[in-house]
Image (cartoon, grey):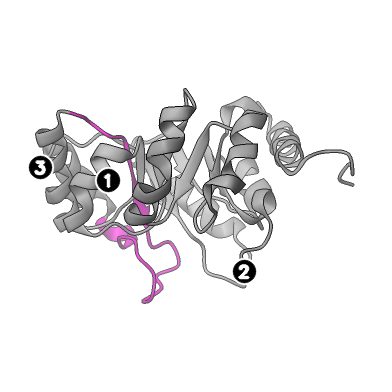
Amino acid sequence: MDQPDLTPLQDVRARIARAAAIAGRKGDDVELIAISKTHAAERIVPLIEEGQRVFGENRVQEAQEKWPALLERYEGVKLHLVGQLQSNKAEDAVRLFDCIHSLDRPSLVSALGKAMDKAGRRVPCFIQVNIGDEEQKGGCAIAEVPALLASAHDAGIPVTGLMCVPPLGIEAAPFFALLARIAAESGLDQLSMGMSDDFETAVMLGATHVRVGSALFGARR
């Protein structure tokens, strides 16, 4: 049972630690990304001041509007792009973000490679996999992962791992296990998987990065 005197951040960190321990892992091996999309700076500041240092945004434009002032004010804060990225926003994304979780198609590989060359900055990326083969979702098909990984390597893009968003309303564990297997077969050891409703399952199945929003900020209006 959750302890009522814990803050949301303390509670999520404790749950990550428990899930990691069950899997014989250390909680410190899991990066908690606080998903701050749609939340104004005044909602984000308390988490930063409590010690959270890694945040995730879905849209480049929204991040550009609220994060530069926060990044100037607080040291050591890292910003991850976790939503779909349009190729024409690649340069902006490379300048602002420390990690990109949504590399999913050859045209984006080309745009990001050129943007990183221009900026003289190599931003680590996760390849997003459409793990449930859903037409409405971003992510490359499972069969396309090797080719996309090879093209990213050729473009000088550092691919750090794989990312997925499992289908809604279905047990997530098989999809997390599948992503872990694909990553292992691809020689990748980082997994961005798990959100507020299923991050403990993701941690037990090998997640190295969990993307948690509502459990930290409350439900979005």
State the residue at coordinates (68%, 47%): 200
Residue 159, quarter of the rendered image = top left
The answer to whether residue 214 is above or below residue 72 is below
Element carrying mark 2: loop
Element carrying mark 1: helix
Q: Is residue 76 left or right of residue 152?
A: right
Q: Of the residues shown, which amino acid type is indicated by label 3?
A: Lys
- Residues marked 3 and 2 touching at CB (< 8 Å): no
Say whether disc 1 or disc 3 marks the residue closer to the N-terminus.
1
Q: Residue 197 at what x, y percent from top left?
A: 66, 58
Which residue is identified by label 1? 93
Category of crowding for the residue at label 3, using alpha-carbon neighbours closer than 10 angstroms: few (below 14), some (14–19), many (at least 20): some
Residue 160, quarter of the rendered image = top left
- Magenta-highlighted residues: 121-144
Q: Of the residues shown, which amino acid type is indicated by label 2?
A: Arg
Q: Nearer the viewer, mark 3 or mark 2?
A: 2
Element carrying mark 3: helix
Which residue is identified by label 3? 114
Q: Is residue 70 left or right of residue 8?
A: left
- Residues marked 1 and 3 touching at CB (< 8 Å): no
| The furthest residue to the bottom | 135
Say whether disc 3 or disc 2 marks the residue closer to the N-terminus.
3
Which residue is identified by label 2? 221
